[in-house]
Image (cartoon, rainbow, N blue to C red):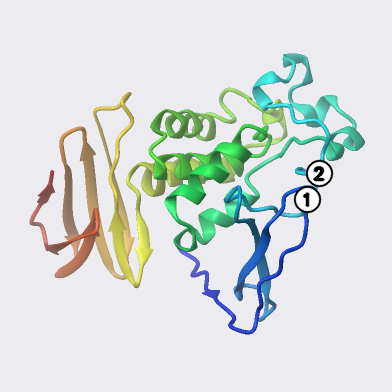
């Protein structure tokens, strides 16, 4: 289920400060050396706004219209606008900057994640099955649980409610997987850090509890999270140490461990 993404900070990459569409004090930092055959991919961000800028296309528009202010008759825009209008607008089809932050989350502090989420989400039309789950996971990360739950519902019900008017073209397997991701990586806060499972469990106010199993390196762990506590049971395996809210929890087979 997991692809290891490697972020390499290249000492030879010197910071630069170009002007990008009016955002001053832009600096490039680090270099991504993952899935690119060694190519270096600089990440551009503003020290003033703490926002990253993918290419300047959205930030270069003269008109900023939040998704909520679009006319109902315009949605989905891919069916109602020309591509020339779409590409010149501030509208973002799916997570782009936020997708990068999701993949390299450990390289960004919580405030930077929050600033980018709050800026880019309001211009995202989510007309892609790939989009709601990433927004849900990051929303849970920054404790916007109402947003996280709303995006969970959009991801899990994309085809049932025909949000993008394209269910007739076939089911969106990515959105189905996204529903799982929002629960496990979003609400339960599961990450793999330094070869160890980490959890930061949360629960939407609309639910009383939820549970799931994880197969991790030959071990099967059952996780059950409620309003009052989280429970961890090693179903298969002999011993496994995990982290819950940055504290070590040791599991042994068939013995339930409760964390409050």
Q: Residue at x 63, y 51 (%)?
A: 97
Point out residue 79 in the picture as x, y percentages from the top left corner: 81, 27
Label 1–label 2 contact, CB within 8 A? yes
Q: Residue at x 19, y 67 (%)?
A: 241
Q: Is residue 11 above or below residue 41?
A: below
Query: Residue farthest to the left?
Result: 255
Instruction: Give left or right: position of 164 versus 201.
Output: right
Instruction: Give left or right: position of 13 versus 235.
Output: right
Q: Which residue is mark 1?
A: 56
Q: Is residue 220 above or below residue 30?
A: above
Image quadrant where residue 210 sits: top left
Give the Cα separation between the discs numbered 1 and 2.
Answer: 6 Å
Point out residue 201 in the picture as x, y percentages from the top left corner: 28, 45
> Along the line of sight, which residue is nearer the eye, 239 or 45?
45
Q: Which residue is mark 2?
A: 60
User: Which mark is drawn over residue 93?
Assistant: none
Quarter of the image where the N terminus is located: bottom left
Q: Residue at x 33, y 23 (%)?
A: 206
Q: Secondary structure at mark 1?
A: loop
Point out residue 129 in the picture as x, y percentages from the top left corner: 62, 40
Badge 2: residue crowd in 10 Å (few <14, some 14–19, many ≥20): some
Image quadrant where residue 44 sits: bottom right
Image quadrant where residue 117 sits: top right
Q: Secondary structure at mark 2?
A: loop
Point out residue 78 in the picture as x, y percentages from the top left corner: 80, 32
């Amino acid at each position: 289920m997991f692809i290891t993404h490697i972020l390499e900070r290249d000492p030879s990459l010197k910071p630069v400060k170009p002007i990008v569409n009016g955002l001053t004090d832009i600096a490039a930092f680090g270099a991504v050396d993952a899935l690119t055959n060694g190519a270096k991919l600089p990440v551009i961000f503003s020290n003033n706004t703490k926002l990253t800028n993918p290419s300047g296309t959205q930030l270069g528009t003269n008109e900023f219209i939040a998704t909520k202010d679009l006319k109902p008759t315009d949605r989905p825009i891919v069916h109602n606008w020309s591509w020339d209008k779409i590409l010149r607008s501030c509208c973002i089809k799916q997570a782009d900057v936020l997708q990068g932050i999701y993949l390299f989350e450990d390289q960004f502090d919580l405030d930077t994640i929050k600033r980018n989420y709050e800026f880019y989400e309001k211009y995202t039309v989510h007309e892609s099955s790939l989009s709601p789950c990433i927004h849900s996971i990051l929303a849970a990360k920054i404790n916007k649980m109402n947003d996280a739950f709303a995006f969970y519902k959009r991801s899990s019900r994309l085809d049932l409610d025909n949000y993008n008017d394209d269910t007739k073209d076939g089911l969106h397997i990515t959105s189905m997987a996204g529903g799982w991701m929002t629960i496990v990586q979003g609400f339960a806060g599961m990450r793999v850090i330094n070869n160890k499972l980490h959890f930061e469990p949360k629960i939407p106010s609309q639910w009383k509890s939820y549970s799931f199993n994880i197969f991790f390196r030959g071990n099967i762990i059952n996780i059950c999270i409620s309003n009052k506590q989280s429970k961890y049971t090693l179903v298969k395996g002999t011993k496994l140490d995990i982290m819950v809210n940055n504290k070590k929890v040791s599991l042994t087979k068939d013995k339930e461990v409760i964390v409050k």
